[in-house]
Image (cartoon, coloured by chain):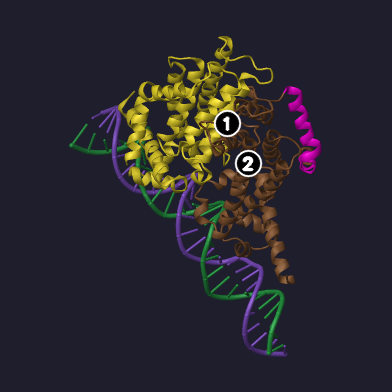
Chain colours: A yellow, B brown, C green, D purple
Amino acid sequence: MSRKQREIANRHALFLEIAESILADEGFHLLSMERIAEVAEYSKGTVYQHFTCKEEILIQLCIKCMTQLNKLFVSAEQFDGTQRDRIIAAFYAHQVWSRTGNNRTDMLMHLSMHGVREKVTERSLQQHDELEQNLVGLVNRMVQQAIDNGELPKQKHLQPAEIVFGIWSLNSGGQMLQQSDLPLEDFGVSNADMSLLRMLNVVLDGLHWQPLHSEAQFKKLLKKFNTELFVDELKQDAEIDKQ
Amino acid sequence: MSRKQREIANRHALFLEIAESILADEGFHLLSMERIAEVAEYSKGTVYQHFTCKEEILIQLCIKCMTQLNKLFVSAEQFDGTQRDRIIAAFYAHQVWSRTGNNRTDMLMHLSMHGVREKVTERSLQQHDELEQNLVGLVNRMVQQAIDNGELPKQKHLQPAEIVFGIWSLNSGGQMLQQSDLPLEDFGVSNADMSLLRMLNVVLDGLHWQPLHSEAQFKKLLKKFNTELFVDELKQDAEIDKQ
DNA sequence: GTCAAAAAATGACTAAGCGTCAAAAAAAAT
DNA sequence: ATTTTTTTTGACGCTTAGTCATTTTTTGAC
């Protein structure tokens, strides 16, 4: 890679970082191409040499952070425990990921609107879809493996993919509701992520996914995630809280 | 109410209907004040006498359809059956509601973004929040009553509000994923709403919410919803399908 | 080091939409 | 019929996406 190419790649990353920080600090409605150019001390035209349109920045940000999520999921998949532990780890990973790097859920939501898919480059679309398939595929495999090794009894009226869809809905719906302006506290939900984790446990119990967890085991599992699996990410999380 | 006042109220409703149909037929990104005025054969300024801003139209549409949802929920609450039946009815009602009147979920999502709350009138905000509280309160009551009458054992580590939040997340997350461009079919989910209903059953089973359902009972229950509870709404649904 | 050709950066410009408001039109009152 | 009030209008200001001719910088041949 030549010096020139490296420069271009660096600037590409710079623009993305700036977009990310604007999104996190000021929100979606204040993210504009002009603004990115201004902060980067380039002109608008230069930004447009890197991204065909605003949506292209969005999807590339999305790809960037879905890649990170993918890594977390792979960690979860390799967690030393049962398949049940691992799927809880993946769920937990998603929550950690939503917290670190502000507005990620928000970003994903925007992506599925405004007809973003129609405006974006084919290349980005393919990358995005491939990542999505990877993520779903990974969780699918977890469920399938649990069936294979006898942890999860085969469901008569629920395919593995449907279970994945349900769990995915639970998590992303929960993240969405948190991200919205709902006064969850007023409704009696003080720690939404913890509530969702407990609900996941309820789902797994409802599926008779062995081994069922006692409260103590569940707490221990979460602690293990914090101290072994997602140490680095949680550090980052704590730093954000400090600011 | 004077003739004048009636005229104004009618036009208000007209603008809302037009906005709704544009939203349904052409999508959010093609909804503009100019467009509404054009279709209604008024000028932009007149539209602005009814709605302080674009967001105000959105939230009033939202209020309109949340009122409909509220009615469906009240029907569900009065369903002749167990509390378990009723909460499934409410869940089902939400699905029926999402289908009839296109893009409702989409609309609600938009509402929780862009800092809509900051732009909208105090009055609409209050109406919206009150409706939201009604909806959550109603489902909360269902859960509480199930605990009181012994259907649902008291949960050690899960408050009723948390259960409601979880179920709500499952449903709204599911609706969101359906509304997005995800190729759910390719992932192995051919009937997302049915999958979600089954997952709700799994959740209720996991909570040991009595009486557990056999497949036959479950199917019968759904049939009963279709033939007794939501007859009118489903007719409307079928009509939309025809178009 | 010089200069022409190639590459990159720029910002004026168009288009489109939100929201405003002075002027025009319509309705009501006298 | 005329004045006053209310309503409607659409031109205008403003912001932002996206384009493209012009300017600036870089490159490499000599």
Mark 1 element type: helix
Secondary structure mostly seen in the magenta stretch: helix
From mark 2 to mark 1, how far is it between C-alphas? 19 Å
Residue B101 x/y as whole percent: 70, 44
Q: Nearer the viewer, residue B149 or B53?
A: B149
Residue A185 visible (yes or no): yes
The verdict on a common chain for dots 2 and 1 is no
Magenta residues (range):
B214-238
Q: In which quarter of the image is the C terminus of chain A?
A: top left
Q: Nearer the viewer, residue A31 or B220?
A: B220
User: Closest to the observer: A215 or C6?
Assistant: A215
Of tags 2 and 1, which is closer to the observer?
2
Closer to the camera, A45 or B21?
B21
Residue type, label 2: Val
Disc 1: which residue: A169
Q: Is residue D6 above or below residue A192?
A: below
Classify the position of the N terminus of chain A by image quarter: top left
Q: Is residue A117 highlighted in magenta? A: no
**Residue found 37% across the figure and 37% down from its top:** A17
Tell me if B224 is positioned left or right of B171 in this view: right
Q: Residue B184's spot in the image, x, y percent?
A: 63, 27
- Residue receiving disc 2: B139
* Label 2 chain ID: B
Tell me the residue at 64%/33% (across/down). B150
Q: In which quarter of the image is residue C18?
A: bottom right
Residue B234 shows in the view: no
**Residue A61: x and y, percent?**
44, 34
Amino acid type for the residue under numbered disc 1: Ser
Is A79 rendered above or below residue D7? above
At label 2, counting other C-alpha atoms closer than 10 Å, the crowd grade (few under 14, some 14-19, many 20 or more) is many
Q: Neighbour class for label 1 at 10 Å: few (<14), some, many (≥20)?
A: many
